[in-house]
Image: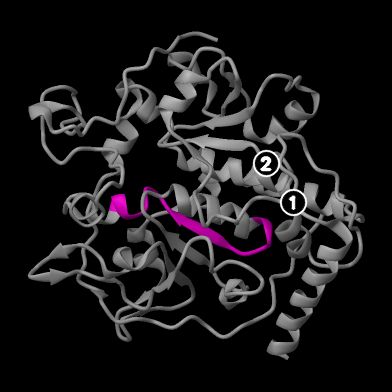
Amino acid sequence: MIKHTRIHIVISFFLAMVLTGCMKDSNSPVTPNFTSSAELLTFIELNRNVMNLEINYPAMIVDELFDNLNNYLVIDIREKSLFVQGHIEGAKNIDQKEIPDYLKSADLTGKAKIVVVGLTGQDAAYVTCLLRLAGYENSFYLDYGMGYWNKAFSEPWVKGKGFYSARYYNRFSYSKKSYSSLPEVAYSDANSLNEKINSRLKACLEKGYDGIKTNMKDTYTNYFDYGSNSFSGCFVICYGPQFMYDGPSGYGGLLGHPASSVLYNPGTDFKSTTYLQTLPAGAPVIIYSLNGQQGAYLSAYLQFLGYDARNIDFGAWSLWGFTGFIKRNMPGVKNPIDYFPNNYTPYGYWLSDASNLGLSIVRDYPFVTGE
């Protein structure tokens, strides 16, 4: 029965390829023309540039946005009170639930890309994935959100830095689960495939990133069985490369990962032809990634497909931030907060060019206040 389910998805995938052709590259929504009974997954994998991430996530660095402000449409999804305190000049403050309607009526002439700006980048990554599912394939999220545009907005990243107790971590490799059916998906007033897609997008946008974010402390409190030293009632995954699964250096060795958590590789493991259906459809899927942005993006995709996906807020930054793990083991990876205390900000930690270390990533790009 399990094998039959997976074969059905692969066959549907092949049929859809014949009927729909290749992906389109545009910032205009693509109208579905394949409306048979094939799964949503079939259409999405063939017609949306969402999880084809072998190269990169659709994250945009602040420098690119600054250099192209006149050419990009900037959508700020933060609460209006935060937007008024300071935002990128020309940005449109739009409630995420209203973005699809806004884009349908907006004049995108001359706007090469759509850039979603959030508080930390995690919220924007979630929305960006949904926009790509809607067909806006030239959508991107601002890497690390407003916290990297100007240090005046970086307090959330400072507070997100932490170190969770590794007492119940280990370095055992845990296997993926057996293949199972895709989740049941609920629709509202949806008959055609296009209506079903819009129904799922609406539900995910209404839930928002705040509706799916969590933390490791609550995950342990709610799901960890200390008798068996494993999670029960949920499925925890490390969404990243092997060295992140190995964990940071400390206590004379590598600290590893939460007991019973399973490694999934970005860009390859969440396709119908690989390991997507090894995720349980009837239990929360709790994701931790490098900085939380990758996990937020993946969570949106899985939520769209009907999985109860949840993201560890700030990812490994909230687990290992006080250890120097990211800095020591991931050369070249951007770090939101420096490990050296300084007097440049009231928060205590900051990426700066102190001692000419060349660590500066947080910019001092201008912003405007008011509406």
> Looking at the image, which residue sits at the far bottom?
1
Along the line of sight, the residue nearer the viewer: 47 or 325: 47
Q: Secondary structure at mark 2?
A: loop
Q: CA distance from mark 2 to mark 1?
A: 10 Å
Kind of residue indicated by mark 2: Glu
Query: Considering the image in quadrants, where does the N terminus appear?
Result: bottom right
Front in this rendered view, residue 224 or 22: 22
Residue 36, image quadrant: bottom right
Residue beneath the point at 89% across and 57% down: 34
The residue depicted at 63 percent of the width and 52 percent of the height is 50
**Residue placed most toward the observer, 346 or 4:** 4
Q: Give amino acid for label 1.
A: Met
Q: Position of residue 23 (x, y in %)?
A: 74, 51
Check if mark 2's residue and mark 1's residue have beta carbons within 8 Å.
yes
163 left or right of 110 in image: left
Depicted 353 relative to depicted 240: above or below: above
Q: Which residues are magenta?
A: 304-318
Which quadrant holds the C terminus? Answer: top right
278 magenta-colored:
no
Q: Position of residue 347 (x, y in %)?
A: 20, 29
Q: Which residue is mark 2?
A: 137
Residue 321 drawn above or below residue 174: above
**Comparing marks 2 and 1, which lies closer to the viewer?**
1
138 in relation to 16, above or below: above
- Count of number-bearing discs: 2
**Mark 1 highlights which residue?**
23
Residue at figure coordinates x 54%, y 66% from the top left: 268
- Colour logic: one colour
Badge number at residue 259: none
